[in-house]
């Protein structure tokens, strides 16, 4: 496993990390039991992953906590998140510590390495900066969290409106940003600034539906052609991204998707969501393969240049 420095946090993070949310929730979205899901966490650490991401909203903090039992706490970076709303209303900042304490109890630990505000929309950013950041700083002073993070609501904010605002402030040590080969807009909008400010970047949505299922990819390509967002001279209507898979290139579209993100300047660790042990091992292998051939990278950049409206979901 390769490791890199997660920006100004100084944490040494694996280039691929495990997310306990997304469409998989460690398999809990389908038929897995809590025991099977926590096994994925233990196996990920055994294979060299050292960052596990969860959130109070995912209902998987307890599974991550169980999966990490018996392991050396100091060798794992725990990332979790605060939900701004409950029952569609903003929660009170004075109750912030209760959420942190609940996460600590679920995770069976006495500190959280990276504590994020979860899926913040642009309309809530000013509130978050004024009322929640001071609470986060108090939690850091009490030793309950180590670093401040924020995640965007990429599913509904694929052009990074909130993150473009957040990146101007100096309080964020880590940001979780949506970036994949279909929507590379974070490169210019976010990563140029986070690189300059040495902010750690966790990449989400590397794969999702479109890059893990051929039918979903074909549907997306057809839709982008219909909207006039793709150029027939750059991408074949029928064969889409098949050009990426060849002897000196990617083993599969999934392999290409993880490798493309892993080597993007500014991205430190690519989150994967899975509830499947074989997928876990395959994705780790992908992230540790060399970059895609330069010609393929340039072609992907040209095909999807200017697209900031899709997520790949
Ligand atoms: N706003 C936020 O804060 C936010 C939003 C979204 C995600 N996240 C974080 O990012 C993490 C990653 O989420 P993501 O869903 O975007 O991850 P992803 O890695 O882009 O996509 C995961 C999906 O791809 C499938 N998959 C993974 N590896 C595969 C393989 N080798 N072959 C076939 N299918 C494969 C998974 O299903 P299987 O279970 O079958 O493998 C799952 O459905 C989340 O867990 C969460 O921690 C944060």
Image (spheres, grey):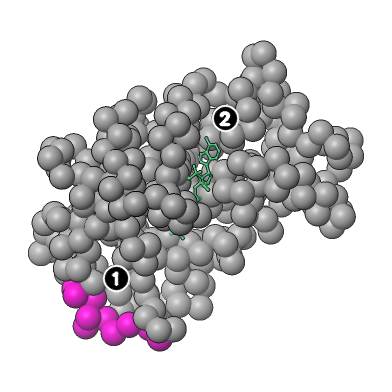
What quarter of the picture does the C terminus occupy?
bottom right
**Secondary structure found at label 1:** helix
Q: Quadrant of residue 7?
A: top left
From mark 2 to mark 1, how far is it between C-alphas? 37 Å
Q: Name the spot of residue 238 as percent of width and height, x first.
A: 85, 37
Q: Residue furthest top?
A: 247
Give 17 or 31, whichever is nearer the viewer: 31
Name the residue carrying label 1: 133
Which region of the structure is painted magenta?
89-98
**Residue 164 on the magenta span:** no
Q: Name the spot of residue 252 as percent of width and height, x first.
A: 63, 28
Name the residue carrying label 2: 255
* Category of crowding for the residue at label 1, using alpha-carbon neighbours closer than 10 angstroms: few (below 14), some (14–19), many (at least 20): some
Q: Quadrant of residue 144?
A: bottom left
CB-based contact (under 8 Å), mark 2 and mark 1? no
Q: Residue at x 19, y 68 (%)?
A: 102
- Main SS of the magenta part reads helix
Q: Name the spot of residue 73 as percent of width and height, x first.
A: 14, 43
**Residue 94 on the magenta span:** yes
Give 161 or 296, whichever is nearer the viewer: 296
**Secondary structure found at label 2:** helix
| Residue 69 left/right relative to 28 | left
Q: Residue at x 70, y 48 (%)?
A: 216
What quarter of the picture does the N terminus occupy?
top left
């Amino acid at each position: 496993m390769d490791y890199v420095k997660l920006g100004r946090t100084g944490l040494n993070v694996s280039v691929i990390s495990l997310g306990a949310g997304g469409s998989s929730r460690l398999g809990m979205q389908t038929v897995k039991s809590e025991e099977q899901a926590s096994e994925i966490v233990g196996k990920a650490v055994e294979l060299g992953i050292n960052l596990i991401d969860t959130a109070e909203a995912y209902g998987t903090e307890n599974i991550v906590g169980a999966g990490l039992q018996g392991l050396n706490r100091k060798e794992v970076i725990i990332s979790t998140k605060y939900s701004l709303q409950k029952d569609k209303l903003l929660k009170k900042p004075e109750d912030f510590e209760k959420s942190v304490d609940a996460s600590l109890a679920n995770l069976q630990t006495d500190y959280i390495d990276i504590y994020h505000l979860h899926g913040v929309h642009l309309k809530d950013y000013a509130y978050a900066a004024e009322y929640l950041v001071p609470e986060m700083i108090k939690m850091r002073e009490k030793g309950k969290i180590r670093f401040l993070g924020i995640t965007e609501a990429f599913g509904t904010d694929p052009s990074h409106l909130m993150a473009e605002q957040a990146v101007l402030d100096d309080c964020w040590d880590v940001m979780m940003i949506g970036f994949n080969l279909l929507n590379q807009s974070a490169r210019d909008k976010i990563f140029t600034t986070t690189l300059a400010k040495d902010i750690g970047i966790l990449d989400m949505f590397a794969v999702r539906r479109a890059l893990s299922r051929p039918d979903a990819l074909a549907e997306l390509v057809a839709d982008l052609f219909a909207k006039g967002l793709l150029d027939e001279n750059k991408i074949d209507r029928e064969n889409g991204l098949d050009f990426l898979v060849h002897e000196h290139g990617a083993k599969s579209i999934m392999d290409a998707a993880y490798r493309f993100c892993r080597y993007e300047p500014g991205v430190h660790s690519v989150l994967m969501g899975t509830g499947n042990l074989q997928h876990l091992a395959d994705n780790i292998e992908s992230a540790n393969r060399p970059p895609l051939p330069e010609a393929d990278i340039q072609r992907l950049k040209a095909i999807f240049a200017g697209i900031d409206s899709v997520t790949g979901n």
